[in-house]
Image (spheres, grey):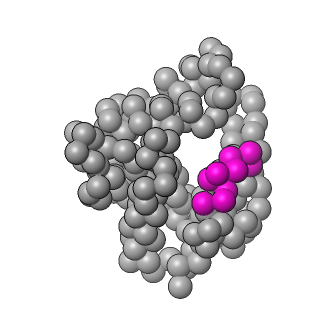
Amino acid sequence: MTLRPAQISDASSIAALSLEVWISTYLKRGVSPFFADYVLDTFTTSNTEKFIADPSEFVMVSQNDEGIDGYIRVSAGSKPPVNGCSDLQIATFYVQPRHHGKGIGSRLLDAAFGHCRATQADTVWLTTNAENASAIAFYLRKGFEHVGETHFRIGTESYLNNVYSYRLN
């Protein structure tokens, strides 16, 4: 496993990985047109190229011999949904499910923390679906603190998300 900054040429791989992780995490009983439209509109090569090229985004990928198996994206200038958080958000953090437990997530998270510390931020925050027990357990093990709640919206639908913050100092 190699960690490296994402490149524009990684965009299609990152988009495909995002589709896989999002669908396997949140669509446990089937894929409705509502969610299919959302993921196909959101996780595109074009959208991915835009955030890779954006200087306010930090995107690190994990790559094995066959391709990218995970990535983390830290967005600067994000408005936190609760008080007490910096403007640094772990906006996306995906590892292919078949690669869970191999240390990929820990290494990506450490790289993100290093980036955040270099910006002199005190904290970094993220949100996760309130029902995503495995992600929540991972974040708590890594030292994140539950600091509030928000809602993830797709169109007019709303889904409860927990907000977690990590102290960098």
| Snapshot quadrant of residue 124 | bottom right
Q: Is residue 5 visible?
A: no
Residue nearest the observer in this picture, 1 or 41: 1
Placement of 47 over or under 82, stated as above or below: above
* Residue positioned 49% across, 50% down in the render: 100
Measuring from the top left, give residue 85's x and y in whole percent. Answer: 64, 70
Residue nearest the observer in this picture, 94 or 9: 94
Placement of 64 over or under 33, stated as above or below: below
| Snapshot quadrant of residue 60 | bottom left
Measuring from the top left, give residue 142's x and y in whole percent. Answer: 57, 69
* Residue positioned 76% across, 36% down in the render: 158
Placement of 83 over or under 78, stated as above or below: below
Residue 77, magenta (yes or no): no
Q: Is residue 33 visible?
A: yes
Residue nearest the observer in this picture, 129 or 53: 129
Measuring from the top left, give residue 59's x and y in whole percent. Answer: 36, 54
Measuring from the top left, give residue 15's x and y in whole percent. Answer: 39, 34
In this picture, which residue range is highlighted in magenta?
A: 130-138
Residue farthest toward the top in the current orientation of the protein: 33
* Residue positioned 29% across, 55% down in the render: 1
Q: Magenta segment, principal secondary structure? A: helix
* Residue positioned 39% across, 31% down in the render: 16
Judged left or right of residue 168, residue 156 is right
